[in-house]
Amino acid sequence: MPSPFSAPRVPLPVPCLAAGHQYFRATMTTILLCISLAVAIETATPQLLVAQKQPSVSVNKTYPQSVVKEITPETITVQFGDEKPKKFPFSVVLAAGGIPKDPRPTGQPGPSYRVLENSMYRRSDVKVGDWVYITYAVLDGTEVCDHIWIVKRPGGLVPPLPEGVKEVGKIPYHERKNAYWDLVDNGNAYPEHFGPHRKYPLAPMPRAVPPKPAPKL
């Protein structure tokens, strides 16, 4: 028998039960959404970290004309004037003995710069003592040699560009350079096949000054 002091059990009306079920469903939905959001954030975090760790690339930088001091299969060391020699690691193409015809990709659409044909020398074309320009890229703070331009070979001749390099000028680059240095160093005129582009040594000083044309009346 129920105690005279206990309250009688009164059944809850149907609307109260429905409201309880709705509250339970809303709570579970909220919990599931929170779990889904947490999983999405945890999954996306490594991707964000990977994106932040993408290497920074700066390309088509030119080191001043320098003298080659050392060449190894992996590096080239040059010296500009009286400055301390500088060592550049070769790009993958140069280290493999290839011809650096293409610009270094930057991850952006389209070519990043135009590679001149006189900058397509291979690692094997360069010798110690050569005067060169180095075109390099900066990859996460490391300066990497991408292209080599041979300007002069003291005591020798600038070598031809590698076979397969298409030159724009009618007279090959190495012939133009060797003719120029033969004129500057030895006072010899350009070869005859240079035609209208042939250059001659200047007469020693004092040189005769050509007369000025008479003024038109």
Image (cartoon, rainbow, N blue to C red):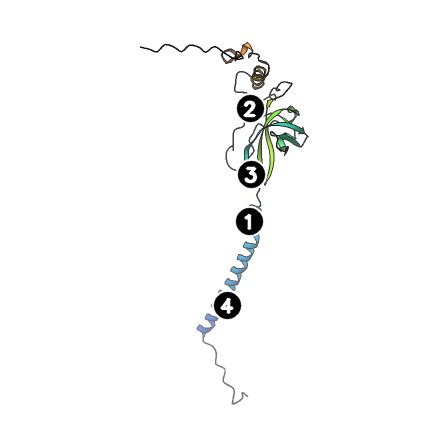
For the residue pair 193 and 33, the one nearer the viewer reads as: 193
The kind of residue tagged 4 is Phe
Which callout, 2 or 4, points at the residue further toward the start of the chain? 4
Front label number (2 vs 4): 2
The kind of residue tagged 1 is Leu
Image side of residue 211 versus residue 96, left or right: left
Q: Which mark is residue 117?
A: 2
Which callout, 3 or 4, points at the residue further toward the start of the chain? 4
Front label number (4 vs 1): 1
Q: Which mark is residue 57?
A: 3
- Regarding residue 59, the answer to whether it shows in the image is yes
Residue at label 1? 48
Secondary structure under the numbered disc 3 in the rendered image: strand
The kind of residue tagged 3 is Val
For the residue pair 13 and 89, the one nearer the viewer reads as: 89
- Taking the view exactly as shown, the residue that stands out farthest to the left is 217
The kind of residue tagged 2 is Glu
Q: Position of residue 107 (x, y in %)?
A: 54, 38
Determine the residue positioned at 66% across, 32% down.
75
